Amino acid sequence: MKKHILILILFFVAGTIYSCTDLSESVRDTALGEEVLGQPGAVEQTLAPAYAGMRSLMSSHNWLNNLQSMSSYEQITPYRGGTDWFDGGRFIEMHQHTWAPTHVSIINVWDGVTQGIARAAIAERSIADLGGSAQLIAEARGLKALYNLWALDMWNAAFDKKSEDIGTDALSTVYRGEAAVDYIMSELDVIENQLGTVGQVGETRFNRSTVKGLRLRLLINKAVYSDRYAANFSHNNADLQAAIALATEIINSGEHALETENYFNMFDLNNEGNREFLFAHRQSAASGGRGDMAWFQTSRNRWRAPIEAFGGNNGSDGAAMTQEFSDIWIGFEEDPRYFTRYIPDGGTLANDADFNWNRGLQKGQQYGLIREAGRYLRDENGHIIIGPLIDLARSGDPLIYTREVGVVTDNQHWAGYRVIKWDLDPTTNGRGSSNINMAWMRLGEVYLTRAEANARLGNWGAALSDINELRSARGARLLEPSELTTLSDVQREWRMELYHEHQTRTWEIRFGSWENTWRDKNSTDVNRRLFPIPQNAIDAAAVNPGYLEQNRGY
């Protein structure tokens, strides 16, 4: 039996093997080798590769962030000064909607998603063969459903990889459109009651709240998933009512609560256990956790921690927010989600522990730690100096972020407002590693979904109530009824709450703004609502004609 299972999971073997039986650690961070299979905790550890597959997808700057945010109204990465961040054109092609089936980020994300489906199916089979519990089998099937939602959202394909077919020549069943929605829903129906609650297993394990969150996303996007190229999406009233009922169930469950102390607590170190999270990917620097979502937008001469040995925890001058995204905040600049101050524009800090990056959208002259000759400057009292930052790494000019940013012009290293939403882990030396967990779904999204469903049904009072409940939790000004009268107003609230969280493309398609134009993005091609299946996958499937068909327009 042990050798049989080893064959199933051989390609997951990693260089470091943990014999730890602490489920909260091993199942999320450990890959399996032969010596693990006979030890306590082996059953739980079979889930580790399926969880680990989320790492690059969620925490890399050029995986989901490129497909879901760079392709949208939200972000832009120009060829900085003609020297940095061209990267084979992967970011510019996303921004301009000119990608092809050979695009490297599309290939990477497709591979990550489909491998995640396979890993979850292998875990399901291995747990059953090892005599594992129904709860662990349900967890594996739940992860398979989560990866399939990504596949459905981006490629209009969901793969029913049956555990009993592992090790055989049997092909996965491919579902598309509404059939894919029904398939994923049916999987969730089977497993929900076999899973633990978030209170029992934590938000970094697939739990009953994750099931509800998955269902909620399927319901609010069902009109899109059922008819991708429709001129106008037809949202079924029954689906909207079901979304309202499900959101209400989540909100009233007592399992979750909105973050009220500080919006950015959810994107900081020690965010594990935040009651707003329905599900989150747990990161550990020791097992490859990444800080890309923090360093990619900020600058090389902005350091995160005043520790002399930490000279590598800085930014990169990669992405910026589009000038159009920056403009949606006009009139809402007092919103803490827009900007929260931690340090002054110049001066000193008596306690090093008080140093932090200002969070939210960064514009104008930037301030931070001043590093010279490998040391951070201090005054005569030993207090850390906060001074104006200069682009020492490239131009030598003051680091003044401008609104204007484009692909052809306004592409210098300082161009574009930046966003610092995710913190750069201040405990690691080097920007590449992180212990900060990444939320897959938060209660804020649940409130927005209920508000949107009510708005689509014409229940504007209920929609306003939910949005103001969320705004109140964030410390933002409450809206007047006249400020929430259209679906564009509702979309604005999605943008303000969930920017930089790998979802923008999805809701832009749903709200009908995906084919709009903005600076250096002129495409209005509805075929771009879906990504192409990578050419290598199409070629590999050609031995089974009709099995895997390319999406329209590619």
Image (cartoon, rainbow, N blue to C red):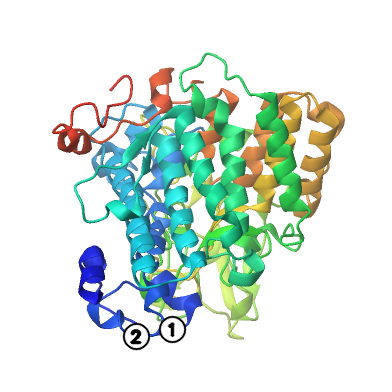
Q: Position of residue 111 (x, y in %)?
A: 29, 47
Residue nearest the observer in this picture, 125 or 383 = 125
Horizontal relation, residue 337 to residue 108: left or right? right
Q: Amino acid at mark 2?
A: Gln
Horizontal relation, residue 137 to residue 169: left or right? right
Residue nearest the observer in this picture, 382 or 230 = 230
Q: Which residue is mark 1?
A: 21
Q: Position of residue 360 (x, y in %)?
A: 61, 52
- Which residue is at 58% across, 85% downward? 382
Q: Secondary structure at mark 1?
A: loop
Do the residues under discs 2 and 1 have CB atoms within 8 angstroms?
A: yes
Q: Position of residue 256 (x, y in %)?
A: 71, 60
Q: Secondary structure at mark 2?
A: loop
Q: Of marks 2 and 1, which one's residue comes earlier in the chain?
A: 1
Against 394, is 491 above or below? Answer: above
Mark 2 or 1: in front is 2
The answer to whether any part of residue 501 appears in the image is no
Residue nearest the observer in this picture, 265 or 205 = 205
Q: Position of residue 44 (x, y in %)?
A: 42, 73
Quadrant holding the N terminus: bottom left
- Quadrant hosting residue 95: top left
Against 479, is 284 above or below? Answer: below
Q: Which residue is mark 2?
A: 39
Residue 58 numbered tag: none
Q: Amino acid at mark 1?
A: Thr
Separation of disc 2 and disc 1 at Cα? Answer: 9 Å
